[in-house]
Amino acid sequence: MTKIQTVNMSDPIAASEILLQAAVVMENAKGRIGATQHIPSTGKILITGDLHDNPFNYSKIIKLAELDQNEDNHLVLQELIHSDKLINGVDMSYRMLIRIAALIVAYPTQVHPILANHELSQLTRRGITKGKGNIVELFIDGVEWVFGNESDCVFEAVDAFFLAMPLAVKSASGLMCCHSLPNAPLMHVFDIDVLNRPLTGADRNNFDGSATLMVWGRVHTETQVCALAKAWDVKLFCLGHAFVPDGIEMLMPNVLLLNSDHEQGAVLPIDLSDIPTAETAMWSAIKLASLPHVPDHA
């Protein structure tokens, strides 16, 4: 098994270094074009939904991904941070970023986190009120609680990690994994070419920026989605960004929604050489609760 680096999560230098290493890997990955990570149509891919710092489900996901068994196997991860379980009143999900950064460094061509609205909000410091308060502030509080006066270098590394994340992972065979799609009524201000170019500050920071629209969208129509599928040559979209009680749900014939963070959370393995319809793919979904707990891998 490939050795995954063990990182002292209380050491600001070690934490910063692994995040920066992973950022460089993502930015320079083979197949990275603009805001999209392109992957071949061989091997298999394991797709997760929103993870939200669930370490138990994460450890099961790593085992299922079988990254060691075949270099053509891929893993897509999304919505990594902002747990609903606070420790001493703060969010400690920076630790999930470190775990995933170490995994990226160990498997640089196989592990693909995608930008989600929670990562984008943390990057831009745009608050999200959910559950126990402003979770962007709670994340900041967690980093400052652990690292104190040395927090700045960790924040800089976290930001670099987020800046390096692609908006989408796309296979030549027609699979596209992205956190969401733009709201249909706002397509007139969305740059459909955003996937093919590097993201700008306006894309990320503006409320009508194309990255913001892409990760926050919730209102979709079949006409809109079919137009995007044609423009981007996509057979199946796999999205997160919605609460899915059963872990997986078919939104449209070519759109699946996934959650991986709760008790009914699911993941989806797909053969990259043969992209199924959403209805067919649902039969392959794996409920994480059905798997035994395994030790953390990083």
Image (cartoon, grey):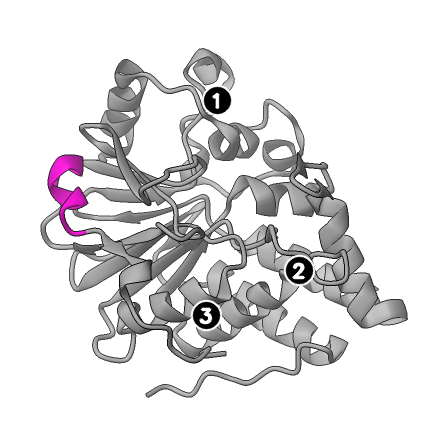
Tag 3 secondary structure: helix
Disc 2 marks which amino acid? Val
Cα distance in 3D space between marks 2 and 1: 27 Å
Q: Where is residue 169 drawn, in percent x and y?
A: 35, 49
Neighbourhood count class around disc 2 (C-alpha, 10 Å): few under 14, some 14–19, many 20 upward? many
Residue ID for mark 3:
104
Residue ID for mark 1:
190
Cα distance in 3D space between marks 3 and 1: 30 Å
Cα distance in 3D space between marks 3 and 2: 14 Å
Residue 7, magenta (yes or no): no
Closer to the camera in the image, 162 or 135: 135
Question: Are the residues tagged 3 and 2 within 8 Å (C-beta)?
Answer: no
Regarding residue 109, the answer to whether it shows in the image is no
- Is 249 positioned to the left or the right of 276 in the image? right
Q: Residue at x 62, y 55 (%)?
A: 85
Q: Where is residue 61 drawn, in percent x and y?
A: 35, 65
Residue 282, magenta (yes or no): yes
Residue ID for mark 2:
158
Q: Residue at x 37, y 20 (%)?
A: 220
Establish if 51 lies above or below 107.
Answer: above
Q: Write down the quadrant of residue 59 in the picture.
A: bottom left
Question: Are the residues tagged 2 and 1 within 8 Å (C-beta)?
Answer: no
User: Which segment did they paint magenta?
Assistant: 276-284
Tag 1 secondary structure: loop
Pick whichever of labels 2 and 1 is earlier in the sequence.
2
Disc 1 marks which amino acid? Phe
- Is 46 positioned to the left or the right of 281 in the image? right
Q: Where is residue 237 drawn, in percent x and y?
A: 28, 37
Q: Where is residue 55 drawn, in percent x and y?
A: 49, 66
Question: Are the residues tagged 3 and 1 within 8 Å (C-beta)?
Answer: no
Regarding residue 15, the answer to whether it shows in the image is yes
